[in-house]
Every structure is written in C-alpha cells, then in structure tokens.
Amino acid sequence: MFEVAADAYNRFMGRFSEPLAALFIDAAGVRTGQRALDVGCGPGALTARLVERLGASAVWAIDPSASFVEALRARLHGVDVRSGVAEELPYPDDAFDCALAQLVVHFMTDPVAGVRQMGRVTRPGGVVAACVWDHAGGTGPLSTFWRAVHDVDPEAHGENYLPGCGKGSWPNCLNRLACAASRRSG
C-alpha cells in the first residue's frame, strides 16, 4: 500500500501511467455504454481515461491508500471512489462490464484472490484485464534501483526476486539491502 501524497506519486509515475492508461483501455476493448471498475486506482491515471470514454456515472474506483482515494474524489467528481482492497471488493456479483487493474496486481497481498474478485464482480462475457511492467526486460521504472541493489549485493537477481527476501517482500528486501550496504561499507 502506498501512503504518499498523490501529487508526489504522479510526479514519479504519471509520466508512465498516464500514456499507458489510454493504451490499456483500448487493448481491453472498453467502449461507450459499459460500466467499468478501476481496481487499485491510485490517484487516477486509468480512472480519468475511463471517465473520458464512459462518463463519470459509469466508472467506479477502489484503492487501499487513503491519500489516493481522497485525491481522486477531489479530481473526478461523480465517480464512485472507495477505500478498499482488491482481495475483498465491496461490489455485488456481475456489477460491471469490465474490471481493470493497471500497475497494481504485483502489489496485491494475494494476487490470485484479487483477480478472482475482479472476475466475480464482472458480468459473464465481460472483460477482466490487468497490466504490469515488463520487469523481466529490465525496463521498468525501478530498474535503476534494482541495478543499485545488485551493485551492493551481487547475489541479488533483478526485479522479480531476490534470494532470501521472502519472495520479493519489500520489508525483507530492503532489510537485506541495508545489511548488504553495511557489509560493504563496514
């Protein structure tokens, strides 16, 4: 979960997430007349594009970060924006024509449960779609960070997994990085 100011997040990720949102809704086949849910909406890059295409009354958004929910409510009036997690979506079955998750599945506590919930709230024949960075290609926005991790600890193996990190758990990875930096400097 991110508890940072929405404008700070937008300054870092907006240059990536804004253009991606337009491509993503086209790839998902979102079209006028549909009802859409943005899961893990953040400060609203995808939500704003959905509103442009569908209108505010046809878009719902949910995110666990209070700062993002507050910022999105202020930015996009008429959108139903809620605080919550993908793994426990507070919507009825078959409520949407499409459920989309942009740059969020890899942050879900339980990605399988989150995607299942997206399927549950999407009508039969609807679209459940997600996109994430191509971390394997080494071109994601955190690539520079992971190259630095490798410089500090040559046993680290890139963005997908660091041995001994609890399968990519951020606190454990950062603890490992801190320990590796201590070993190197001390």
Image (cartoon, rainbow, N blue to C red):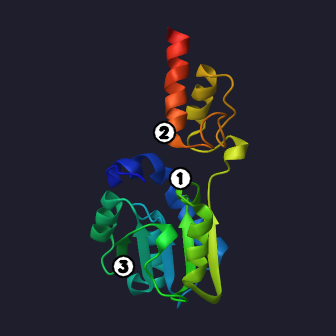
SS type, badge 2: helix
Indicate the quadrant containing the N terminus: top left, top right, bottom left or bottom right.
bottom left
Q: Which residue is mark 3?
A: 79
Give the percent coordinates (x, y) of residue 127: 64, 80
Q: Which residue is mark 1?
A: 16
Between the C-alphas of marks 3 and 2, the distance is 34 Å
Give the percent coordinates (x, y) of residue 137: 72, 44
Q: Which residue is mark 2?
A: 171
Q: Are marks 3 and 2 in contact (CB under 8 Å)?
A: no
> In the current view of this chain or complex, which residue is farthest to the right?
137
Q: Residue at x 46, y 53 (%)?
A: 14
Residue type at tag 3: Val
Give the percent coordinates (x, y) of residue 119: 61, 79
Location of residue 71 (image quadrant):
bottom left
Mark 3 or 2: the one toward you:
2
Q: Residue at x 35, y 47 (%)?
A: 8
- In the picture, the disc for residue 84 is none
Q: Earlier in the sequence, mark 3 or mark 2?
A: 3
SS type, badge 1: helix
SS type, badge 3: loop
Q: Residue at x 55, y 89 (%)?
A: 94
Location of residue 160 (image quadrant):
top right
Above or below: residue 80 compared with residue 164: below
**Which one is in front, 99 or 14?**
99
How many numbered tags mark residues here? Answer: 3
Residue type at tag 1: Phe
